[in-house]
Image (tube, rainbow, N blue to C red):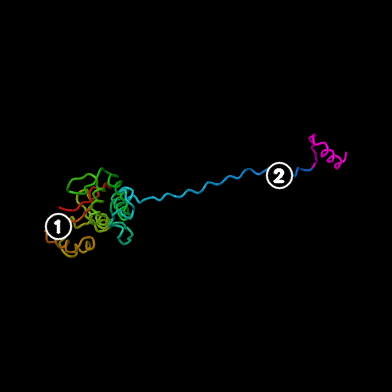
């Protein structure tokens, strides 16, 4: 039976399943798998700065005086410090300039428990600093600024600024502090036996941040 006769027979009977076999591949194309809709790209969640997260406030409402400081590259102290001291110093400056309260809180306890931050009551340095900032006291900026000044060593502690140890004996001594404290306040300190009563930072020879306190 030729091909035309075979096809005609299939059409006529309708009751038979007719299959034509050919040596050539079938032209039939399998159906494409159903299209699946690609998932919509997720929208990144906006993250608060560490300071905003800690305070439970929008970043714009978190007080931090260091954000107004002019940019400055942190260079190694001169003369060179022991590496643990230099590392802690640079880490504190970076965290303060970034207004990173979370990082500051970690540094407080990183190489030893706690830091002296007030001569009054309190056991939470970061909470105290936030309260000071909210009252207009630029404590975070001052922490960074004094650590960028010359230092002095007494016992096992390295202190910033050096005038905390050497005293305010001349205008040359308090000149580097202008801009950190009002000049009138610095002159008042000079008259008070030349004692520097501003914020000072102390780091032990092992890199333990031990104090960031102001007052007598």
Which label lies toward us, 1 or 2? 2
Question: Of 53 and 126, which appears nearest the observer?
Answer: 53
Q: Which residue is mark 1?
A: 195
The magenta region covers 1-23
CA neighbours of label 2 inside 10 A, class few (<14), some (14 to 19), many (20+): few
Numbered disc 2: secondary structure: loop
Point 75% across, 42% down: residue = 26
Q: Quadrant of the N terminus?
A: top right
For residue 6, side relative to residue 137 (left or right) = right
Quick one: label 1 or label 2, which is nearer the N terminus? 2
- Mark on residue 29? 2
Q: Is residue 7 magenta?
A: yes
- Relative image position of residue 146 (x, y in whole percent): 24, 57
Question: Of 133 and 12, which appears nearest the observer?
Answer: 12
Question: Of 69 and 55, which appears nearest the observer?
Answer: 55
Point 29% across, 55% down: residue = 64
Point 56% across, 46% down: residue = 37
């Amino acid at each position: 039976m030729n091909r035309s006769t075979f096809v005609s027979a299939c059409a006529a009977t309708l009751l038979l399943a007719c299959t034509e076999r050919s040596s050539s591949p079938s032209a039939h194309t399998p159906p494409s798998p159903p299209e699946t809709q690609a998932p919509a790209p997720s929208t990144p969640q906006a993250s608060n700065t560490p300071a905003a997260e800690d305070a439970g406030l929008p970043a714009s409402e978190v007080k931090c005086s260091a954000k107004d400081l002019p940019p400055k590259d942190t260079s190694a102290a001169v003369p060179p410090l022991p590496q643990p001291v230099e590392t802690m110093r640079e880490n504190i400056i970076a965290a303060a300039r970034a207004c990173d309260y979370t990082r500051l809180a970690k540094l407080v306890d990183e190489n030893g428990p706690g830091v002296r931050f007030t001569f009054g009551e309190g056991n939470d340095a970061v909470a105290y600093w936030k309260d000071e900032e909210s009252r207009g006291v630029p404590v975070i900026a001052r922490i960074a600024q004094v650590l960028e000044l010359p230092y002095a060593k007494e016992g096992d502690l390295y202190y910033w600024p050096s005038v905390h140890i050497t005293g305010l004996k001349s205008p040359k001594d308090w000149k580097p502090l202008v801009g950190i404290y009002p000049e009138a306040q610095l002159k008042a300190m000079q008259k008070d036996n030349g004692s520097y009563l501003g914020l000072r930072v102390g780091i032990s020879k092992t890199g333990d941040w031990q104090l960031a306190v102001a007052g007598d």
